[in-house]
Amino acid sequence: MNNAIFDELQDKANEVDAIGGTIKFVIDDTIVYVDGTGSKNIVSDSNQEADCTISTSVSSLKGMQSGDLNPMTAVMSGKVKISGDMGLAMKVQSLMS
């Protein structure tokens, strides 16, 4: 597991309000599960069903974080795949920036 990615997403999730659902990130071979159904976001490496699943590569994730890759372009070009609750997917930007 890529601990740097996990730690970074955990730090971001702790800085923002609870997202109001569950999101699973599949970043290459790393799984990051964010449970925001309670009063705060809880991050784990649990591979369970989520309201929204977002799959991408480490290079695409880094590109979006640096601003070199537009998230909408990444989705349209297939570099990012989203399934489930699109409203939750929109909240992900707060975890990425």
Image (tube, rainbow, N blue to C red):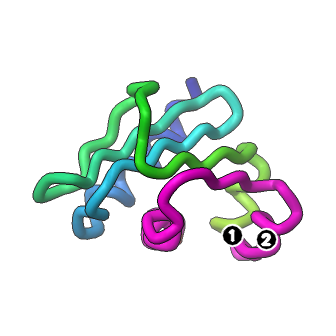
Left or right of 18 in this view: 22: right
Q: Which of these two is toward me, 38 or 13?
A: 38
The dot on residue 66 is: 1
Residue 12's place in the image compared with 8, above or below, is below
Quadrant in which the N terminus appears: top right
Residue 50 painted magenta: no
Q: Secondary structure at mark 1?
A: helix
Q: Which residue lies under the disc numbered 2?
A: 69
Residue at figure coordinates x 23%, y 69% from the top left? 17
Crowding near the residue tagged with mark 2, few <14, some 14–19, many ≥20 C-alpha atoms within 10 Å:
some
Are discs 1 and 2 less than 8 Å apart at CB?
Answer: yes
Q: Is 90 inside the magenta-drawn segment?
A: yes
Residue 21, image x, y percentages: 31, 55
User: What is the x, y in percent for residue 47?
Assistant: 45, 25
For label 2, the SS is loop
Q: Residue at x 53, y 66 (%)?
A: 86
- Work out whether residue 90 or residue 57 is closer to the camera in this orientation and state it: 90
Residue type indicated by callout 1 = Ser
Magenta part of the protein: which range? 67-96
**Residue 93, can we see it?**
no
The residue closer to the viewer here, 36 or 52, is 52
Tell me where residue 71 appears, x and y as whole percent.
70, 71
Residue, far left: 39
Give the residue displayed 47% in from the left and 38% down from the top. 32
Q: Residue at x 49, y 51 (%)?
A: 52
Question: Which amino acid type is marked by label 2?
Answer: Leu
In the rendered image, the vertical position of residue 8 relative to residue 27, given as above or below: below
